[in-house]
Image: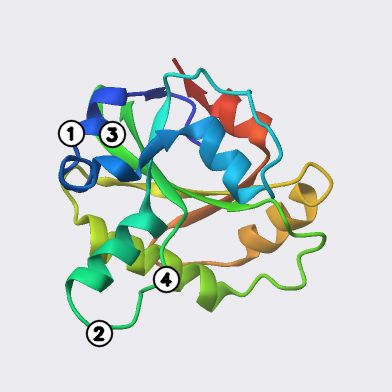
Amino acid sequence: MPTDMIYCKETTENHHLSLSSKDCLLSLNMMISKENRNKSCSVFDSSWIVLDLDAVEIKTAKKEGSRDRNSTCDCTAGVKQSKAPKMLLIECRLNYESVNGIKEGDLDSKVRGSIALMGQDPAILNQVYFVFKDKVQPQAFRKLRAMKSNRKEYIAITINGLKDSISA
């Protein structure tokens, strides 16, 4: 797991989708709360914002007419890794009580849809974070580690683990 990630608000705000969908930017705390049945979250610095990819995809699909909505990860955040700006994909799975519903094809579809929507400028990190409740994360970690995606490394993490993996 990368440990040299530094949160970068500028990278988040300057992504082409952020510039065209400013209404889809929200704090990481709000994103976690939204994806966790509106349970309050104050783990992250309030200045940390993310781009809600589901909201951007809904807007994009409507603008393009009657096309079906593509599956996407919940959000993306700008980070710097080795001083280079990158985008981190984050998918919240906080409502899962077990790993039974986790399917590799569904995860792959979310990642592919996110990459298609975002493009590769700046580059998207090879690691994709899937955020689980504390009690589900150990099982999810084992299940995701067994998934050998040729494209990305899937990492099961908790909310606090996500905070610990990104420095300010």
Q: Which residue is mark 2?
A: 66
In what element is the residue under mark 3?
helix
Q: Residues within 10 Å of mark 1 (few under 14, many from 20)?
A: few
Residue at coordinates 25% horizontally, 84% vertically from top-left? 66
Q: Position of residue 63 (x, y in %)?
A: 19, 69
Mark before the other along the chain sequence, 4 or 2: 2
Are circles 1 and 2 on residues that touch, CB within 8 Å? no
Are circles 4 and 1 on residues that touch, CB within 8 Å? no
> Is 109 in front, or is 95?
95
Q: CA distance from mark 4 to mark 2?
A: 15 Å
Residue at coordinates 79% horizontally, 41% vertically from top-left? 134
Q: CA distance from mark 1 to mark 2?
A: 29 Å
Q: Where on the picture, by quarter, is residue 51?
A: top left
The residue type indicated by label 1 comes to: Asn
Q: CA distance from mark 3 to mark 1?
A: 6 Å
Q: Position of residue 120 (x, y in %)?
A: 19, 52
Mark before the other along the chain sequence, 4 or 3: 3
In what element is the residue under mark 2?
loop
Marking on residue 14: 1
Q: CA distance from mark 4 to mark 1?
A: 23 Å
Q: Residues within 10 Å of mark 2 (few under 14, many from 20)?
A: few
